[in-house]
Image (cartoon, helix red, strand yellow):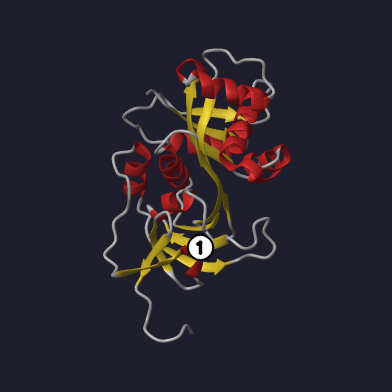
Amino acid sequence: MSLVPFVFGHGPWARDWRDRVPAMRDCDDAAFVDVLAPSSPAFFHLLLAGNARAFGGMAIPAWVQLDCATLPSAMVGFAQRARDVDPALRADLCRRAGLAAVDDDALVPLAEFCALSTPQPGHVVGFSLFSLLPGLGLRAKALGLYVQQATTQTGITQIDNGALRTHCRFGPLVVQQVGVQVHSKPGTTLIYTLTSPAPSTLSALADGSLTRVDHALPTERIPREALRAGDVLVDVDARDAVVAQRPSGPPA
């Protein structure tokens, strides 16, 4: 499987991020896709289609992908040439994107992560992580944090979202809030912060030669629904969350 790392944006920082993409064992040279270039609409709509396939009713609209992602920051991930994409997946993405077909050489985005910088240097807010192939979501997030040289990440996800396990692979997540009334999914949305792994670790995660960041915390299992602010989340399974052991006694 030959992958093409991509940075999809417009500003000069996005070109710099493309130049920071490390060499990876199963990847061709990284591509920079300018969201405002006349040749970019097919890629733009294929990425939207991949997001919609992954998120269903929570897919981002086109204006958000432009106004809030690719212009102020960039979307970072992995693509394949259309000829290498599973034919059924290729056809579904084209249908969702409103495209009759794409050339065999066209890039088809298959995994993506976006993070927005904050006024605090090194602190980013990540969103829109998706993957259409197993294992690529982890690599896309690692690549995004690596090229942005992030040291801290705030994330927004849902306690019943399969991507939560991927986020846990980057190290302990400090839960800031469970239940966010202003979100489209108020009852299940979780906000966390993560201390970003070292650049060498992110590079190994992006390459796929490392699949998780280890920790040495004593842990306990609780139902996902019992997560609360202050918990340190280290893993999840189909039903439970694995958290660093809570202090005995009632919550503060």
Which residue appears at 34% of the width and 32% of the height? Answer: 24
- In the depicted structure, whether residue 72 falls above or below residue 34: below
- In the depicted structure, whether residue 83 falls above or below residue 44: above
Along the viewing direction, whichever of 222 and 184 lies nearer the viewer:
222
Farthest residue toward the front?
A: 239
Label 1, on which residue?
192
Snapshot quadrant of residue 47: top right
Q: Position of residue 226 (x, y in %)?
A: 48, 70
Snapshot quadrant of residue 97: top right
Q: Position of residue 179 (x, y in %)?
A: 60, 66
Q: Is residue 40 visible?
A: no
Q: Is residue 195 visible?
A: yes
Snapshot quadrant of residue 120: bottom right
Which residue appears at 42% of the width and 54% of the height? Answer: 238
Which residue appears at 57% of the width and 28% of the height? Answer: 33
Which quadrant is the N terminus positioned in? top left
Structural crowding at the residue carrying mark 1, measured as other residues with C-alpha within 10 Å and reported as few (<14), some (14–19) or many (≥20): many
Amino acid type shown at disc 1: Tyr
- In the depicted structure, whether residue 163 falls above or below residue 119: above
Q: Secondary structure at mark 1?
A: strand
Q: Position of residue 225 (x, y in %)?
A: 50, 66
Which residue appears at 37% of the width and 52% of the height? Answer: 169
